Image: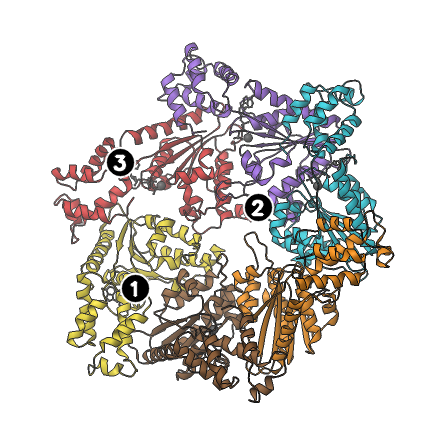
Chain colours: A brown, B orange, C cyan, D purple, E red, F yellow
């Protein structure tokens, strides 16, 4: 079944920058020191892979709350590196496939990567790849076993590889042993420290939607929010209470009313 | 299996207003401020989707007790919007299908919607789509994984989409992580506040089946009832104790006897 | 699998009075006020379905201990109504079928009923249809999901339907949510009140097997027994201690000895 | 699958006395009042079935510890009745069959029996038919559902049937609801009362293997033992300590040494 | 599936002494009174089967810790009897087979044996035949049901059979009811009593690898060890600390150093 | 299914030194007395197998924390022995195969080995072969049963075999009984004692990346680390804080900055 599945999969070489760009739809703004530190370190690992003598395979896991910017960061490392093979493995392109087919597709990407001297593979949202659900818990052991073996199997002689995983369910990954299969782990936080507050100033100002006085209050209210939700709140608020004001606000003619902004914040799913 | 299932599914484009109208068989009466507020906010999200720059996908969950009016409200938003593609995904049209076939059918609707510039998809009674049952609990993880990916996957460039989910089992949805996959959530209540009582006056008067004095007492007895059950009680009561009086009551010649009305209230399954 | 199953099923239209009569093998005797009340109310619901404007689908559940007379009562409503389509769905005609085949058969009955202006469907012994067993508990979720959807799906325009369910495992049905899918519920009791005692007088006298003095004592001993077991006890006792006396007793030449009657009562499986 | 299985099964009509005789390999000795009482009552039920007006189906369960004589008693009733159709359903003739095939074979026996005016079916060792094992517990729900329906389904008009079940796991049968599906239940005990002691005298004397003085002591030691194990102990003891004495003992030339008899009693698996 | 499997199995008649001899690779030494007692009793049961009148089937279970000599003893009984059919059923010859195939192979051996007037079947390592694992626990219910039926099913008229089971997981066998299906049970112990110590003297002296003074100390250290492990320890110790001394020791030129002997004892997996 | 799988597997004879060398990519440095002791003992067992009379099969398990050097040690024994058949069985070459196929592949290696007079089989990372995951726990019982039988099944006459297992989940192996199937077990530790510290000096000096003073501090910080992670930390640190210094450090022109070294130590996944 698995072997059949393997043959059905059409090979897809090389780095598809389009896919990676789509992972950071709102661009990259300064999110404070921690985000910065993790990004630099992951870039350093890419460099290490390039020059390594004894470690042809380096694996790093970016974990943190939903929406904290893990996928965007992994994509940015992939784009920033000049590796000939960069590929993202995501549940989005495997909807509804059987476990063996998903497995075969994942293996295929690794086999393709082994043909390249230098490669980066992003295992995005590993809990989704594993079809994890907290009740039970349930997950695909076939896929988890496959990942654990792939994360330890050395590429052929002369080929070096960096694997970047992302997850918002790190304690689950720990409990199945996938976490230990990575050599390095970084925690990507929400925007909760002073640094993060500064970062949100930038976002908010950049969006240019608040009156000068309100930016401070808004930033305060956004404390401890993931960067991804920030964009949603602002856009909701920009519609105005009775709609129709979006154009006026984006063009700078109007600003967002604070009371409406707080209302929108309430509607957002607790994170 | 899934891929086969996908091919068997015949595409069905566009908004079928008939289906949507059937979802609000008893029309829409004023159910108080909360119902009104949620309706307006959901309409605003539809507007936001139309003008959005950075969020091509907005997802909102309407949750609340059985019969509180969630499906009727979602249908009303779909009818009220002028989106070219509006579609309801319901367990009713997938009775007895296997999990992969259901999955394929759901994916098909999203794929169709991606071809439209603006689209609304109603995921009705998500716990039923997931084949949820409290014992175990059991549910289809294949479908829950599919929904979680679809609720986060961005439509192709230039296409915008609003997804409205409904459920009366919000705590289950939370426990499987489907709840967090929505960006916004609203609680649709029963008719329990003063506002709601006023609302029921309207229903009761409109139905014109009580004597003037009884309307108050009846409304009091109906406190904290879902709007959907209200219609059932009234219709039962209208038959009269020994039957046959329905025509007389609907034509206004007779009114409902209060003692019989209270009896009927008792027979109704506890909600 | 399910679809295949659906095609294999041969359609069977109309009301088969024979089947319904077989459900009340011992006829209908007066079992007291409660039985009477439930019967009348269920007949009223049938009437309501006939004249309804806003509720094309009414669903009622008869629940109570094993042998209390639920199936016989449902059959009697079916016979008493003058609906063109009356059908009983029972596990007896689906022995050994796979879950999808059972499902298909159930759906088939509903589809047939939708073609009739007025229809009654009896879902008999729902726990048996669901293949329920207390250990686990185990049951067919495929069938329970199907029932929950069918119990809420509206018939096509202009078609009205009454569904009567019966069960002796109401707490199980509650735990899987099937109970809430019904709009009305009635509890059918054993013969335990004074009323019931009177009822058993009738049965006992009618059977004419006791001496005048013994009828009172026998009725007392039968307190809180389901009507169905009553017939079994009497028939056992009628054989006499050493057999052979049945004919003499039924023809009124002999009466049942009380000591033997009490013995038989002991052998009966605790209810 | 089940339907195929049904067709593969070759019909086998009528009462096979050979099979029934094999069920009481050691004949029937007097085991005391309780055994006697149960036997008579079960024979009475057979008579009742013959003359019944209102109960075409009577079902009785013989339950008790392993080896207490349940199967032998059921077989004896079958032989003693003059019913044209008597059949034993046992796991022995279905070794290694799949659940649907076993199911089909059971249904086949009932269908055959329905063709006979009077029939007896012995469901032997129901826990083995259900593939019961205490760990879990596990069992075949397919077969248990089938049995529960068959135990309640009425034979066609004019056909009467007695079903005798046997089990040594009555509490398991209760927990799955199979117990309640029988109308009458009898507990078949070990040889533990004075009556039983007398019974064992008979067995022991009949076997004629003890010296006159030892019979009392031996009978005492055998208190609370199932009748079936009694035969095993005696035969073991009859070999003598160093073997070879069996012939001498059975021919009455030697008697069993009591010390060796007690040793053998120890080796017997705790019952 | 099972029936197919049954046909694929090629029949294999008669007693294969080679197989049985391979089960006692290290021969049989005196292991003390208990071992002796069990062996004699099991030989007596074989004799009983030969002369039996009323018990055509005798079943005995040898249970005890891993390596205590159960299989070797069963094999020795098989060799010692002069039965025309002696066969060992072991997981070793069924590696990787499916449950139905294993089942069919087991049934096949019984069917073959039924053709012989006298037969012995050794069910070796029943927990391995049942694919038992403590976690869960998991095991093959198909095989356990098959064994329970086979252990009670009488051979055809005129054919007598002895079944010897072995297991080191007696409490598991009890929990699934397989234990009760045997008529006799014996516990085969480790070498823990004085008797056993004497026995190990024999092994040790026989092996001739210790100096006269060390034999006592060595025997003491070996207290409570299964006979099978004893051979392993001695052979390990015989290599000497730095290897190469095996030949010298076995030829009697050197003796084992006690300190090294104790070291080896430590490395042995806790039993 | 299993038998098919067996035929698909292409035989692969003999010792592939390349595979074994790849298992100790970083060579073998002195890791202290314990590592040394285990290595020597395992070599002795290989010698014992060569000269054995009574034990044609010896099995040894190397267990210890992830990265402690188990696989490298087993490979080194395989290379060091002069056995004609040395083979490693690893999950890496069986990714995505079904359980029966994996099983067949494992059996194949044993069957091949049986053809050689002397053979070594390395069962690498047994928990991975068993597809173990802590949640549940889940694992392949098919494979665990196969291993337990293979670890006890004697090779054909005249063929001797050493099996070396490795695992970092020894308590799991114990719970499924695989541990007891080995005759000898050794615990391979991390570098935690004084000995180990000396060993790390060697590694660190050999790598020549620290200034003389820093070696002590670095070794201290590395206490209780598995040898495998040591190489990763050093290589990370060698990149320098802002990258690019690897060449300078490896060529001895620069040394690693201690503060950066501690940072890298933090990033390493907790072991
Ligand atoms: N410094 C930053 N780092 C990461 N993302 C940023 C940054 N600045 C802006 N963003 C934007 O924030 C969003 C982060 O979303 P992203 O999908 O990466 O989060 P995530 O942690 O992967 O979420 P999830 O847990 O749902 O997968 C992106 O739209 C990205 O363009
Ligand atoms: N303001 C209102 N909002 C919603 N429904 C209304 C309103 N006024 C009247 N209704 C009527 O009330 C009924 C609400 O039923 P609906 O099926 O929407 O409830 P629901 O919450 O989806 O129930 P369920 O949990 O069973 O799916 C409809 O028949 C609708 O016509
Ligand atoms: N008033 C009555 N109501 C119902 N049944 C009656 C009445 N009078 C007599 N009977 C007889 O009592 C019996 C009731 O059995 P019935 O099968 O309906 O019980 P049940 O509650 O459906 O049992 P179960 O739980 O086993 O399905 C029938 O044989 C019926 O003829
Ligand atoms: N009065 C008696 N009643 C029953 N069996 C008797 C009696 N007298 C002697 N026997 C003998 O005792 C044995 C009873 O065994 P039987 O198989 O009937 O027990 P069982 O209760 O069915 O055991 P199990 O629980 O193992 O199925 C038979 O061999 C039978 O010949
Ligand atoms: N008196 C004896 N009884 C049994 N075995 C003996 C005796 N003397 C020596 N042996 C040897 O001891 C070993 C016993 O191993 P055996 O395989 O029979 O143990 P076991 O209890 O079946 O172990 P396991 O639980 O692993 O199946 C055999 O090699 C046998 O030759
Ligand atoms: N004395 C030594 N013993 C073992 N390995 C050593 C030794 N010296 C250096 N090494 C190196 O250390 C590494 C040990 O890794 P190895 O894969 O053997 O660990 P492991 O215990 O099998 O890990 P895992 O639990 O992940 O399988 C190898 O790269 C090996 O070259
Ligand atoms: Mg992400
Ligand atoms: Mg709804
Ligand atoms: Mg009923
Ligand atoms: Mg029996
Ligand atoms: Mg053994
Ligand atoms: Mg390893």
Q: Mark 3 and mark 1: span between their CA atoms? A: 40 Å
Quadrant hosting ligand 5: top left
Residue named by callout 2: D98
Residue named by callout 3: E191
Q: Quadrant of residue D163?
A: top right
Q: Mark 2 and mark 1: span between their CA atoms? A: 47 Å
Q: Is residue E184 above or below residue D9?
A: above
Query: Which quadrant would the C terminus of chain E be assigned to in this image?
Result: top left
A197 vs C158, left or right, is left
Q: Secondary structure at mark 3?
A: loop
E77 vs C146, left or right, is left
Q: Are marks 2 and 1 on the same chain?
A: no
- Disc 3 and disc 1 in contact, CB within 8 angstroms: no
Q: Is residue B161 above or below residue E252?
A: below
Residue pictured at 26% horizontal, 40% vertical: E225
E211 vs A164, left or right, is left
B119, A121: nearer the viewer: B119
E204, E249: nearer the viewer: E204
């Amino acid at each position: 079944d698995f072997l059949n599945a393997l043959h059905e999969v059409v090979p897809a070489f090389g780095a598809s920058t389009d896919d990676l760009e789509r992972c950071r739809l709102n661009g990259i703004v300064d999110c404070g020191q921690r985000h910065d530190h993790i990004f630099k370190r992951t870039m350093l690992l890419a460099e290490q892979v390039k020059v390594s003598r004894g470690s042809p395979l380096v694996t790093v896991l970016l974990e943190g709350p939903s929406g904290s910017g893990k996928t965007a960061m992994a994509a940015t490392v992939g784009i920033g590196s000049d590796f000939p093979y960069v590929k993202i493995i995501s549940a989005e392109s495997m909807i509804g496939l059987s476990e063996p087919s998903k497995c075969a597709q994942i293996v295929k990407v690794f086999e393709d990567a082994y043909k390249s001297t230098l490669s980066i593979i992003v295992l995005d949202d590993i809990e989704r790849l594993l079809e994890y659900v907290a009740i039970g818990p349930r997950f695909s052991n076939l896929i988890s076993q496959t990942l654990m073996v792939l994360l330890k199997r050395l590429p052929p002689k002369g080929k070096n590889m960096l694997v970047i995983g992302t997850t918002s369910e790190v304690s689950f990954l720990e409990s199945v042993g996938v976490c230990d299969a990575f050599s390095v782990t970084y925690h990507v936080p929400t925007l909760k420290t002073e640094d993060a507050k500064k970062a949100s100033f930038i976002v908010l100002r950049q969006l240019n939607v608040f009156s000068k006085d309100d930016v401070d209050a808004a930033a305060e209210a956004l404390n401890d929010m993931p960067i991804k939700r920030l964009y949603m709140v602002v856009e909701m608020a920009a519609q105005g209470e009775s709609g129709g004001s979006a154009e006026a606000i984006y063009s700078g003619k109007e600003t967002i009313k604070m009371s409406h902004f707080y209302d929108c914040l309430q509607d957002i799913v607790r994170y």
